[in-house]
Image (cartoon, rainbow, N blue to C red):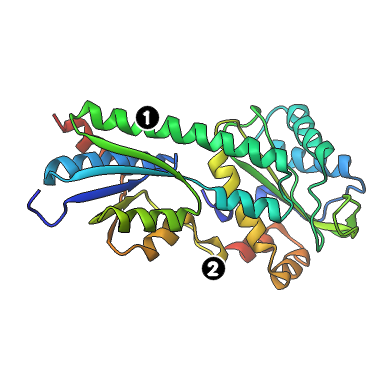
Amino acid sequence: MALVDLIRPEVVKVPLVSTTKPELIRELVEVLRDAGKISDVDLVYDALMKRESLGSTGLEQGIAVPHAKTPAVNSLTVALGISPKGIDFQAIDGELSKLFFLLVAPPGQSGPHIEALADIARITKSQAFCRTLASATTPAEVVELFTED
Amino acid sequence: MNGPIKKILVYVDGTEGSITAAQYAVVLSRAVRAELSALYVINTRALDDLLKARIFIKAEEEEYKQDLEADAGRYLNHVRSLARKKGLAIEAVSVSGSVRQEIKSYVQAHDIDLLIIGELSHVRSRRDEFYNEAERAMRSVSCSVLIVKDEDQVWELYDALT
């Protein structure tokens, strides 16, 4: 399943209210819980924080891609959040991160997980698209940006 | 094997759609007496891209590569089983690289007449970046391509094959 199929209004949060990395990851994990995608918030949160402890997933140009494998999900699950003010995610360019793609996948489904991450790697090469996405103010607007004809 | 289709390749990526495609490939291969091959591509190109983009760290790349190798073995064994149950010989192969390029190369190297793939994603963005790998392969191979739909009907066809 392509990334675009996974991004629905119920897994998008705009604006994010968190001001730190742990708060932000928990906030997006709770989005997944509220959307009915996961039930064990702590298990998913711990998996994501463990991955972050190996190296930040904060990339360049305000984008971060926290991700992890965890048995707490049955299939690849994505949440997307936008922080207009930005958060210090220890990004590799030292800038604040504003766009957050959070992915969790079960062990044994690495193929879809990798394809979704590769989709993100490709779209984040487009500065224009990322700027437009970062300026979105509603979940519906975000989804429309991914699916418009 | 005197008909127009002598060699069929089914692309298997572990999705339900690709397994349905494999069932259909078994049915079609039996019907037209074609040789059947199944290909799984360990997408090391994507792993490399993720490492370059710094989404992956090196240890993670290795871990996911091992996962994909295990997936390849598991899914190809399943496809072998689907063929064997219907008395059909199958060549099941895994390779590493770019999905699109490896499918294209296999088709050329083995004189494949027909590539069979699973159903494509329903939702499409206008952005080129969202093309999935099977779709990109479909566009680049030199042979004809068949996209398998309707899982229920395919299951009935497969089940009815004696």
Front residue of A106 and B87: B87
B54 above or below A145? above
Alpha carbon separation for disc pair 2 and 1? 33 Å
Residue at the far front in the pictured view: B109
Q: Quadrant of residue A84?
A: bottom right
Chain assignment, label 1: B
Question: First in sequence: mark 2 or mark 1?
Answer: 1
Image location (x, y in percent) of residue A19? 92, 49
Q: Is residue B113 visible?
A: yes
Give residue B77's mark. Answer: 1
Left/right of residue A27 with respect to residue B105 in the rendered view: right
Q: Residue at x 52, y 48 (%)?
A: B43
Residue at the far bottom in the pictured view: A128
Q: Residues within 10 Å of mark 1 (few under 14, many from 20)?
A: few
A135 above or below A69? below
Total numbered badges shown on the rendered structure: 2
Image location (x, y in percent) of residue A41? 75, 30
Q: Residue at x 77, y 64 (%)?
A: A134
User: Which residue matches tag 2?
Assistant: B128
